[in-house]
Amino acid sequence: MGTTALVSVEEYLRTSFPDADREYVDGRSGERNGGEVEQRDVQTAIAHYLRTHYTKRIWAGVEVRVQVKSTRFRIPDVTVVLGPKPADRIIRKPPVVAVEVLSPDNRAGDLEEKINDYLAFGIPYVWVINPETHRAYIHTPESSHEAKDRVLRAQSAGIEIPLSEIFE
């Protein structure tokens, strides 16, 4: 994540960014990777599939701020919450799934830090999807593994997405 000058949480929350929202990690807000057609297409496909197949059971949003610690705000590519649309403009309770769709600019260390933040916050499932290879990985507090059967699952929530639905 590219960094800028240190800013307070309050200043970060008051700021609108002209290009795209930015994550905030311990006083630094940084530009996010993404914006490419393939990445956005995968985000849209995931959110659409979830909203279509799990109507009224979940809410799925694209690029929503999630406060994972008092000084950390992450912006998953897709966030899945059990129940209706959150009333607040920032998600402050652990969603059931955080989805990261890789872009060519993603760095392994940055992604690992995000996954660790999500899991430490209490998000039970983190899905990482590579649009180039059409492969996906499921991270939980207990394990990390590739979705070899080509289905992303959040078992405790009863949610599944076949990768064939994302990469049609």
Image: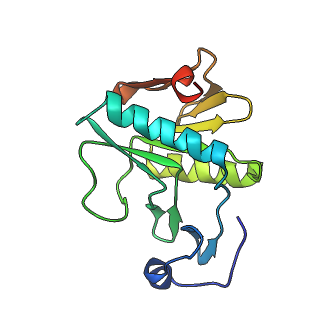
Residue 28, image x and y in percent?
62, 76
Is residue 80 rendered to the left or right of residue 129? Answer: left
Please report the residue visible at 41 percent of the width from the left and 37 percent of the height from the top. 48
Please, is residue 84 above or below residue 90 in the view? above
Residue 157, image x and y in percent?
34, 30
Indicate the quadrant containing the N terminus: top left, top right, bottom left or bottom right. Answer: bottom right
Residue 137, image x and y in percent?
62, 31
Tell which residue pokes out farthest to the top in this image: 149
Camera sees residue 51: yes
Is residue 85 rendered to the left or right of residue 142? Answer: left
Please report the residue visible at 57 percent of the width from the left and 41 percent of the height from the top. 41
Instruction: Name the colouring of the figure.
Output: rainbow
Indicate the quadrant containing the C terminus: top left, top right, bottom left or bottom right. Answer: top right
Please report the residue visible at 26 percent of the width from the left and 34 percent of the height from the top. 55
Image-quadrant location for residue 58? top left
Please, is residue 74 above or below residue 59 in the view? below
